[in-house]
Image: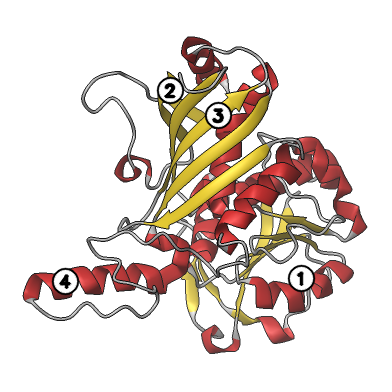
Amino acid sequence: MGYRVVVVGATGNVGREMLAVLSERAFPIDEVAAVASARSTGSEVEFGDTGKMLKVKNIDHFDFTGWDIALFAAGSAVAKLHAPRAASQGCVVIDNSSHFRMDPDVPLIVPEVNPDAIDGYKARNIIANPNCSTAQMVVALKPLHDAATIRRVVVATYQSVSGAGKEGMDELFEQSRNIFVGDPAVPRKFTKQIAFNVIPHIDDFLDDGSTKEEWKMVVETKKIMGSKIKVSATCVRVPVFVGHSEAINLEFENEISATEAQDLLREAPGIMLIDKREDGGYVTPVECAGDSATYVSRVREDPTVDNGLVLWCVSDNLRKGAALNAVQIAELLGRRHLKKG
């Protein structure tokens, strides 16, 4: 016996990826529904590579009664309005937006990192999926933290335009084309030209000079891994279509060598260590696109601090940063609580 699963925001990049991941991981499903806004109602989306087409239903009129799990990929405004309604109708919500992440009654889950926290989902019948840049980072940090206790994290991100949705991807493509033919590259989605450029600004600015994206990485890492970890983040948008990269500096309470860290990362769930000290012996976003792993490369000791390491982390943000993590949460929920399939 399988589950009845709803994908909300099924016509967007992450929603389509959720459908693909559900299919490829053979998630036990009896029935799946594609749900989106009124403007998408009646259109069709494919359920992974099964060839099965799903007719999109209107979120405003959708009844979640009798459905087991709803994967939300439709943004904070939709989640704020409809996720509590779905939860009240008995459907467990796994939400990809930022709206519920810091709610103390909503667990924020990365299954490889804090699976036990999922047991708190019954307080609101909602589980939050972390920010894409946070998700891949904590997967890489978990085995190292368990071994030597991380004291401080300094991270610079190199985030692809797919993190800004289809509009971001379209803007990079259009600007790149325009530059090649001599037309102006006018920014619309982003604050400055993104083609052949980098933009040190993701989401709104806060009073302290940081951005909301940077704030998310700080508070979400603390909620997932423990409040004692200090985190400083600089989040940058780069002209890459898919795949977020991160340069991470770590300071530990206890001694840990680069070799020890490599051994731990090599055996850790969800991680693929590609770390050869030679030309091309590391992973870039091009190689990770479409893959489920969080890749770690360039592991080395940081001589500027006691017990310091530096590493490079790359992952497909539409998968581990969103769709895959949500489906992994659903799998964890099934094993621990719903007991079907």
Left/right placement of residue 130 relative to residue 276 reads right
Q: CA distance from mark 3 to mark 4?
A: 39 Å
Q: CA distance from mark 1 to mark 3?
A: 36 Å
**Position of residue 67 measured from the top left corner of the image (x, y, whole percent):** 78, 65
User: Which residue is label 2 attached to?
Assistant: 299
* Nearer-the-camera pick, 85 or 236: 236
Q: Residue sitting at 70 percent across and 86 percent down?
A: 60
Q: Residue sitting at 88 percent across and 70 percent down?
A: 88
Q: CA distance from mark 3 to mark 2?
A: 11 Å
Question: Which label sits on residue 83?
Answer: 1
**Position of residue 333 measured from the top left corner of the image (x, y, whole percent):** 77, 45
Q: CA distance from mark 4 to mark 1?
A: 40 Å
**173 in relation to 304, above or below:** below
**Position of residue 39 measured from the top left corner of the image (x, y, whole percent):** 53, 89
Question: Which label sits on residue 177?
Answer: 4
* Nearer-the-camera pick, 303 or 28: 303
Name the N-terminal-most of marks 3 and 4: 4
Q: Amino acid at mark 1?
A: Ala
Q: Disc 2 vs disc 4: which is toward the camera? A: 2
Circle 4 packing at 10 Å, graded few (<14), some (14-19), many (20+), is some
Q: Amino acid at mark 4?
A: Arg
SS assignment at label 4: helix
Name the N-terminal-most of marks 3 and 2: 3
Q: Label 2 near label 1: C-beta < 8 Å?
A: no
**Position of residue 22 measured from the top left corner of the image (x, y, whole percent):** 58, 52
SS assignment at label 3: strand
Name the N-terminal-most of marks 1 and 3: 1
User: Which residue is label 3 attached to?
Assistant: 250
